[in-house]
Amino acid sequence: MSTPVTTAARRIAQEWHRNRSFIVWFTVLVLLIVVSIAGPWVLPSPSSQELAIRLQGPSLDHVLGTDDYGRDILSRVVSAGRISLGLSALITMLAVGLGSVVGLVAGFYTGTSSILMRIMDSLMAFPAIVLAIALVVALSSKPGALAETIALTVVFTPYVARVVRSRALTISQRGFVTAARAAGVRGVRILVVHVLPNALPTIMVQATFVCASALLADASLSFLGLGVAPPTPTWGNMIADAKPYISSSPLFIVAPGTAIVIAVMAFNLAGDGIRSLVDPRAKAVLNLQARERRQAKDSGIRGSQAASPPHQ
Amino acid sequence: MTSLIIRRIRDMVVVLVFVTTAMFFILHSIPGSPAIAILGQEASAEQIAALNHELGFDKPLLAQYLSFMGHAFRGDLGYSVSQSGGVMHAVLSYLGPTLLIATSATVLGVLVAVPLAVRTVSRPRSLLSRFLMGASSFGLAIPSFWLALILVLLLAVRTRVFPVTGYVSPLESPARAASFLALPIIVIMAHQVALLVITLRESLAAEMLNPYVRTARAKGASERRVMYRHVLPNGLLPAVTVIGGNFGSLLGGVVIIETVFLIPGIGYLLYGGVQARDYNLILGITIITAALIVLVNLAVDLVYAVLDPRVRLQ
């Protein structure tokens, strides 16, 4: 008897065999989110200062040591995760929402495409971080979470719009859209009921990549002092704080950077995993790997020698 | 081909006008007058009015815009308060180091990434290939400024292989310039190589599924010849687009790490402009970097058209 749970378990087992990295990084992603939500309740306060124990190495009380004000680095990395991940998630939702609307409209009502996409092209002509810096400076005399959110939403929207538009364009030419048109369904309804659901996998993949880029951009901005300002910790402003103490207490700078790397990798690779399920190009790589694995198994020899064709 | 070039140049001009207009209005919609930002909150009303008049900020916005565009078309992007000179002059004199790092990292990156990507496709299960795929994902996730700081710690502070920060023009002393530029170029290259290995691996793997690979093998071509003679030229095409499309983020990376290595490039200039709230300078830098990116994209499109006749004939 197959219940939904066993079916799901079997699906996961199959996926595990084919695409291990997706499952691993998806788990890492979930863990990161759980830790940054629950962590600050368990760990000591990220803002309690003890100047007597500043810039100490790891100890039982402070697993990753203390910073220049004697604050616990682990607590600060975890609560910085709350800010950095939270802001990136917010930026992603706004950019993906806005970008999807622009992309769907430009792809479905092709008449609007030339104006909408010209605007998007213009925004994409700037180096993302330079545009973000200019926008943050323009938006407020004092940088902060709001200016950063608006700036990065503007920066990332066109990337989503471009991908969604090309997907919407393809979907709009499919038979079921023509059929719906012939049946007299209104344009907006076709867009929402027929085009949008088919574009959703593409949109989800884009969302993971935007989130990874937003994390990196947030880190760069707060490193330059243009994001959320200290004493509120973010991964980027922690690295800026740690810069003067780089050689005396390396853990101070290594900890937030490692957190960024893990979080960005988790988003990128979870996104790759979703993409390999929906994008034929990415599937080609998986298939090639699977074929090599099969060949290696068939010939009964382990390792790469059996997999590659003989050299002449 | 000529019509393609003309069409692309026309598109480029349109995008540049859009970009300039958008940036102008965004930066001029700033709450508070730029004069207050320059003179500080304690300045008297007369001082502020005088500076606003001197900088032309007291005219209507549309008049300011038209005069700005008129000057911009003649290569004049206004006056930079923090640099006490023309914006164009300031940007051009700081552009060298940035472009030097960006181009050398791209060229070296391609030279390193192509053989590595070929290796990951021809022997996907070898230890090196598996390591490379992990390393590439890692390379894409690492923030450039953090990698820069870690490398400074390991290679400049601890072991003193490279100088910590600073810059010497290659025209003055190529050897010293190379030692100062080595770390910044390595940092930017790491990202470039990671991106190229991932893209190339995907496009090469997709090419390997084509029947011409079997034909080439059947006629007795060596595996090396199949790869470099047949698969690589086809698989390189998407990589050209990726290199072009990534030029913006490459430039952005250089901008950030210039502040770490204290290299007198565009990023250093921009950072100074942000600190001084020098809006003309920020506007000028965004417009010129956008123009650079648009130019690179034009070049990429033309290279693509030369490499792939299907694009040319469309």
Image: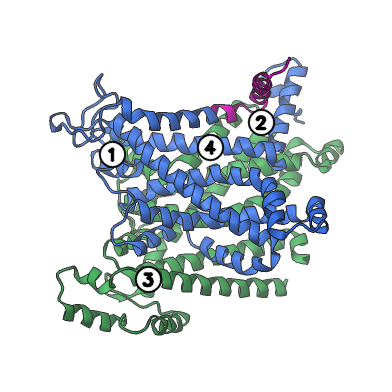
Residue identifier under label 3: B29
Q: Quadrant of residue B306?
A: bottom right
Given residues A69 and A75, the one toward you in this image is A75
Callout 1 touching callout 3 (CB < 8 Å) = no
Residues tagged by mark 1 and mark 3 found on one chain of the structure: yes
Given residues A113 and A133, the one toward you in this image is A113
- What shade has chain A been given? blue
- Give the mark nearest the N terminus, 2 or 4: 2
Q: Mark 2: give few (<14), some (14-19) or many (20+) Cα within 10 Å.
A: many
Asked if the stretch drawn in magenta spans residue A63, the answer is no
- What shade has chain B been given? green
Residue identifier under label 4: B137
Residue identifier under label 1: B157
Is any part of residue B199 visible from this angle? Answer: yes
* Picture residue at 66% right of the left edge, 37% below the top: A276
| Numbered tag placed on residue B124 in the rendering | 2
Asked if the stretch drawn in magenta spans residue A6, the answer is yes
